Amino acid sequence: MDTIFFAASKLAGAFLFPLPASLLLLVFFAFRLPKFKQKVWVLVPTFIIWVASTDSFSQWLVRGLEEKHPPVRLETLENSDAILVLGGAVDNLALYEQQVQLTSAAERMTDAVLLFQKRKAPRIVFTGGSGNLFFQTRKESDFALQFFQSLGIPGKAVFLENESRNTKENAEKTAELFRKNKWKSAILITSAFHMERSLLVFANTGIKIHPWPTDYRSRVKILTIDDFIPSSQSLENTSIAWKERIGLFVYGFRESISTFLPLRIRYPWSKDWN
C-alpha cells in the first residue's frame, strides 16, 4: 500500500506543478477552439515547450556539450600561476547581502578552494562583474571574495576582476590582469557545458589554459517520470544548453568575419601594437 501511495503521490504531484498544469490547460482549451488552424497555433508551441521540458530531451542537449569535457583527475592537473574562476556561480541579486548566496553552479567556487588547498596554484582569480543588463551596482566578485575568505583563503591570494559582463569580456579583462602581473598559465574553472565556448574565447588571450570542468548536469540514463512530464529543472537545462549552442554559433560566425579584419582590430591586446 505504501508503494502505491508513493507512486500516486509522485504522479499527482508532478501534474499539479505550475509548468505541466499550465501546459495541460493549454491542450484542453486548444481542443475547444472551433477551427483546426486555431488548434494548431496553440498545440504546436505547447508541444515544443512540453518536449523541451522533459528530462530525456534536456539530457540529450546537455550531454552533447559535457561529454567533450569529462572530469580531470587531480593528479594529472598541471600546476599553474593562477586558478581562474569564471563568474556565474554567485547570486549578486540575493536579498541578504551579508550572506553569500551561490547559484546552481556552486561547484565552480568550491572546486577553486579545493585546488588552492591542493597547492595547484598560489592564487585564485575570479572574473565576473554583473551580467544583469540594467543592474550593475552589485558585483559577483565582491561576494566571491567574501566566500573565499570565509573558507580560509587569504585575501592576498584572491584577485578580482569586476567589470566583465559575459564570457568574452571575462577573457579580455582577465588577459589584461595576467599581462600586468606576468602570469602565463591558469587552471580554468567553469561548468562543463560552458567549457567548450570558454576555451574558444580564451584561445587568443595568450594564457596557457588547463581546463577544469565542473558543475555537470548529465545524469545516469534511467527511466524517470521526468522523461514524460515537464519539469522546470529540465527546462532550465534545455535553456542552458540552447544558450551555449547559440553562443558557439555566434562565436564561430564572429571569428569567420574577423578573419577579414586587420590584426590590430582582431587582437587589440597584442604587444606587437605597443
Image (cartoon, rainbow, N blue to C red):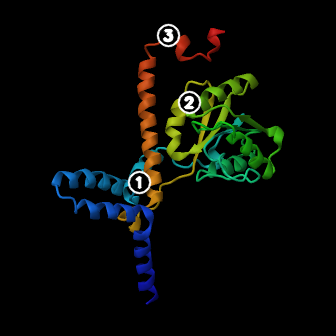
In the depicted structure, whether residue 224 falls above or below residue 71? below
Type of amino acid under label 3: Pro
Position in image of residue 215 (x %, y %): 57, 51
Q: Are marks 1 and 2 in contact (CB under 8 Å)?
A: no
Front in this rendered view, residue 93 or 195: 93
Mark before the other along the chain sequence, 1 or 2: 1
Q: Residue at x 21, y 52 (%)?
A: 38
Position in image of residue 35 (x %, y %): 16, 55
Q: Residue at x 37, y 65 (%)?
A: 229
Position in image of residue 178 (x %, y %): 70, 27
Position in image of residue 166 (x %, y %): 57, 34
Q: Which mark is residue 136?
A: none
The residue that mark 2 highlights is 168
Type of amino acid under label 2: Lys
Marks 1 and 2, how far apart at CA? 26 Å
Marks 2 and 3, how far apart at CA? 19 Å
In the depicted structure, whether residue 174 falls above or below residue 226? above
Type of amino acid under label 1: Ser
Mark before the other along the chain sequence, 2 or 3: 2
The residue that mark 1 highlights is 58
Mark before the other along the chain sequence, 1 or 3: 1
SS state under label 3: loop
Q: Are marks 1 and 3 in contact (CB under 8 Å)?
A: no
Q: Residue at x 40, y 49 (%)?
A: 61
The residue that mark 3 highlights is 262
Residue at the outermost front position: 34
